[in-house]
Image (cartoon, grey):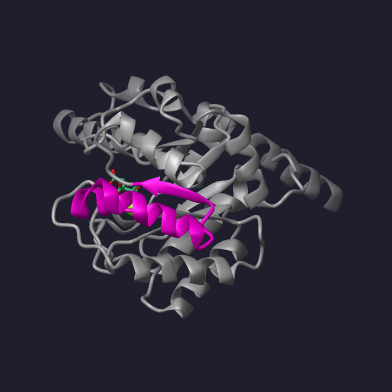
């Protein structure tokens, strides 16, 4: 792992400044973080829906707690120095103290940025019907609490608004502007349905805008070229590798159960050597051998 002395937050800001739009890709675990780095991404993401479905096996409905997410954050930041954007849902608790605790913990565990949203505590996935949101004032208070709790000024606070689907475009634009006024660094307008909308957010808030290009949702799969033209600064692929990995696992389970052997799916597998290469197995092994040799 290469050593980088700047803070995770600063590295995230630098990445946003250096790539237009910055591709931020979901990494469901530490192994995927290494794969994302190897593929050339400059920033990675820990999805709330991913922690829920992947680590806990439950839906994205506000069931996950702060410690569940922190465990995955620490595992990722322990092995990968790419700046990590973390989905903290509604902040893990309704008071300013809860939000403050969430922010402080995220910084401590090595995250670079969080996004915090304006849904009610019993939240839903942003691309599902019947979402409910808190008042603009309550959301602004969440942002103020988050900004105030920062123990590192470079740490990025991104405000997500789910208002478009609930109250419409004007409300979503107002909320985004109010969050930036309250000190948020970037805006994540959720479940956008038309490309031109991003431009409206960008010109209204004068801060970086994130486009959530999640599959099978409300937002078309816009390309980086289209998003750059719509003044988008960051593009998120939160669960793409997770969805592919799950499908691959299902195929393998089905085949082994059906055929009594894995021979028909062996070509779909990462080999032992590929795995060892991705996690740097041989360097660890050499260190171990050297240690034992020194003791002899
Ligand atoms: C970005 C998101 O918040 C997530 O948890 O990854 C989800 C993604 C999804 O369910 O596709 C969301 O958009 O609500
Ligand atoms: Mg989420």
Q: Position of residue 212 (x, y in %)?
A: 36, 39
Q: Which quarter of the picture shows residue 115?
A: bottom left
Residue 265: in magenta span = no
Instruction: Determine whether 138 is above or below 109 in the image.
Output: below
**Foreground residue, 49 or 206?**
206
Q: Position of residue 53 (x, y in %)?
A: 29, 52
User: Is residue 129 toward the left or the right of residue 7 in the image?
Assistant: left
Indicate the quadrant containing the N terminus: top left, top right, bottom left or bottom right.
Answer: top right
User: Is residue 87 toward the left or the right of residue 184 in the image?
Assistant: left
Residue at the (44%, 39%) spot, across then down: 202
**Foreground residue, 97 or 274?**
97
Residue 280, can we see it?
no
How many discs mark residues in the rendered view?
0
Q: Position of residue 140 (x, y in %)?
A: 42, 66
User: Is residue 29 toward the left or the right of residue 156 in the image?
Assistant: left
**Foreground residue, 76 or 201?**
201
Magenta-drawn segment? 161-189
Q: Position of residue 173 (x, y in %)?
A: 35, 49
Residue at the (22%, 38%) spot, across then down: 217
Residue at the (46%, 65%) spot, across then down: 143
Residue at the (55%, 66%) spot, across then down: 147
**Foreground residue, 18 or 87?**
18
Residue 168, can we see it?
yes
Q: Which quarter of the picture shows residue 257?
A: top left
Residue 168: in magenta span = yes
The main secondary structure of the magenta stretch is helix
């Amino acid at each position: 792992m290469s050593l980088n002395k700047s803070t995770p937050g600063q590295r995230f800001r630098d990445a946003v400044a250096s790539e237009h739009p910055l591709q931020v890709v979901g990494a469901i675990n530490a192994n995927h973080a290494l794969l994302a780095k190897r593929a050339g991404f400059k920033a990675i993401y820990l999805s709330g829906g991913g922690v829920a479905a992947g680590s806990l096996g439950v839906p994205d409905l506000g069931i996950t707690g702060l410690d569940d997410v922190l465990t995955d954050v620490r595992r990722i930041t322990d092995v990968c120095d790419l700046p990590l954007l973390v989905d903290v849902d509604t902040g893990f608790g309704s008071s300013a103290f809860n939000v403050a605790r969430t922010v402080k913990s995220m910084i401590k565990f090595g995250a670079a940025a969080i996004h915090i949203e304006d849904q009610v505590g019993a939240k839903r996935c942003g691309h599902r019907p019947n979402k409910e949101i808190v008042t603009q004032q309550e959301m602004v208070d969440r942002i103020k609490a988050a900004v105030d709790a920062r123990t590192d000024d470079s740490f990025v606070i991104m405000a997500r608004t789910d208002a478009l689907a609930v109250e419409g475009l004007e409300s979503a634009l107002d909320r985004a502007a109010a969050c930036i006024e309250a000190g948020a660094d970037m805006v994540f307008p959720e479940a956008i349905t038309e490309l031109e909308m991003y431009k409206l957010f960008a010109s209204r808030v004068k801060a970086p805008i994130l486009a959530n290009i999640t599959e099978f949702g409300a937002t078309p799969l816009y390309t980086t070229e289209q998003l750059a033209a719509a003044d988008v600064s960051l593009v998120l692929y939160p669960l793409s590798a997770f969805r592919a990995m799950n499908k691959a696992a299902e195929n393998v389970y089905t085949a082994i159960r059906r055929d009594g052997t894995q021979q028909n799916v062996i070509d779909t597998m990462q080999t032992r050597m590929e795995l060892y290469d991705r996690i740097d197995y041989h360097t660890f092994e050499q260190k171990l051998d050297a240690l034992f040799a020194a003791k002899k």
